[in-house]
Image: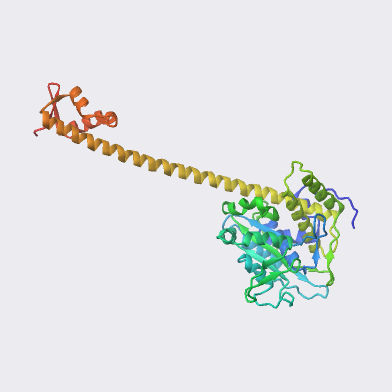
Amino acid sequence: MSTAIVVELPTAEAFWTSRPILEHLLTFARARRAGPWAVLGSTCARAVATLEPNVMLPPTVGAPASLNLFVALVGRSGGGKGAAEGASRDAVRFVDHNGHPIIVDEFPPGSGEGIARTFRPAGTDDNEPNPRSRALLTAPEVDTLTALGSRQGATLMPELRKVWMGEQLGFNNASKATRSILAAHSYRASLIVGVQPIKAGPLLDDADGGTPQRFKFLPVGDPDAPDVAPDTPEPFIVKAPRWGAETVHLDIPDIAREAMDRHRLATLRGEDVDPLDGHRMLARLKMAAALMILDGRTVVTDEDWHLAGVVTRVSDRTRVGIETAVAERARAVSRARAHEQADREGIVQDRAEDRLKRNLRGRILRRLEKVGGSTLRDLRHSVIDSKTRGVFNTVMADLLEEKLIVEIDGRFHLSTA
């Protein structure tokens, strides 16, 4: 285990220049006019998906944890989520210890049951190993993902939370044709989701379940993009170590272990901490492991942890931006609804007033026809009630203007014109 003490890198510039692979990703992203952080996140998700599920994090809290990594690429429609994923595919080539390419299959998440069947199709014999052990799940638009998760009886969100931990998936249906039980830590899955900020509400709303805390939110923009794009470099070759088939618990730095232990202890003691922040720290450790994989190593170091802290700060800022956009959108919707309600109420009020005026016009005309003529005072007392008192003067003015009545020597009569 590394005992080196590394000061946490304070700037994004220091982050990108700290390792050849990171400098390469920055240059490649800018050559392809893609967001560097989004390219990094996509590449880390791919890096994790190259490992078999027997490689996992040690049991710092509870049981061993999967390396399965969730990344959200954040930007407006057309902002560059697809560009980031495309650049990531071309920027790095993963090969095994013999130099053979490591192929990562990509699939949409689908339903909760569909995730388990990605690795273990329906009808697979109970004694057979998973036909597929690794996959990269991609959802270009978060609203598609959350729509699937919000259907009545949907299991997608709970299953995704299990995927992140590497827990058992699937459903033990009676029929073998529909049964799909996926054993814990028998699969490797990374998830990349495209997120338009104003459509991220349902994902953020699942915070009580810990879903957004499992994601790294990375922007697709690049405010410092150069006017002239650099030349596209050749793909970077990442060679995987020989991991073997036995279960491997990665060595992690004491600084990470101690931070997670302090949080867990505070949670156990009932101190004023958010229990779900434990997911946030585990997400940082997973990112540290992904950076380890990109560097071609087998031990998570202090530097990996600190670099993952820089990514976490970027993620936190990006998530705050999403929350702000969602809140502003909600306020705009509320204002629009309030205006719409006011308009409806105004229309209803206008219609009610029109009915009162029509009713009062009829009374006035019938009264004048009956008595032949009347003073304003007598007419007022004879025709109005509590509802029409406020519109009497208006109705009288209208009748005079329309020449339906006339005033002669202080008395009102029906017009004979």
Place of residue 331 in the rendered image (x, y in percent of width and height, measured from the top left): 53, 43
Q: Is residue 414 visible?
A: no
Residue located at (68% from left, 77% from top): 124
Place of residue 230 in the rendered image (x, y in percent of width and height, measured from the top left): 70, 60
| Residue 208 falls left or right of residue 283 | left
Residue located at (80% from left, 56% from top): 62
Front in this rendered view, residue 334 or 86: 334
Place of residue 120 in the rendered image (x, y in percent of width and height, measured from the top left): 68, 73
The quarter holding residue 65 reads bottom right
| Residue 314 falls left or right of residue 148 | right
Place of residue 146 in the rendered image (x, y in percent of width and height, measured from the top left): 59, 58
Front in this rendered view, residue 315 or 408: 408
Q: Quadrant of the C terminus?
A: top left
Q: Quadrant of the N terminus?
A: bottom right
Compared to 239, does 392 lie above or below? above
| Residue 316 falls left or right of residue 1 | left
Residue located at (50% from left, 46% from top): 333
Front in this rendered view, residue 58 or 176: 176
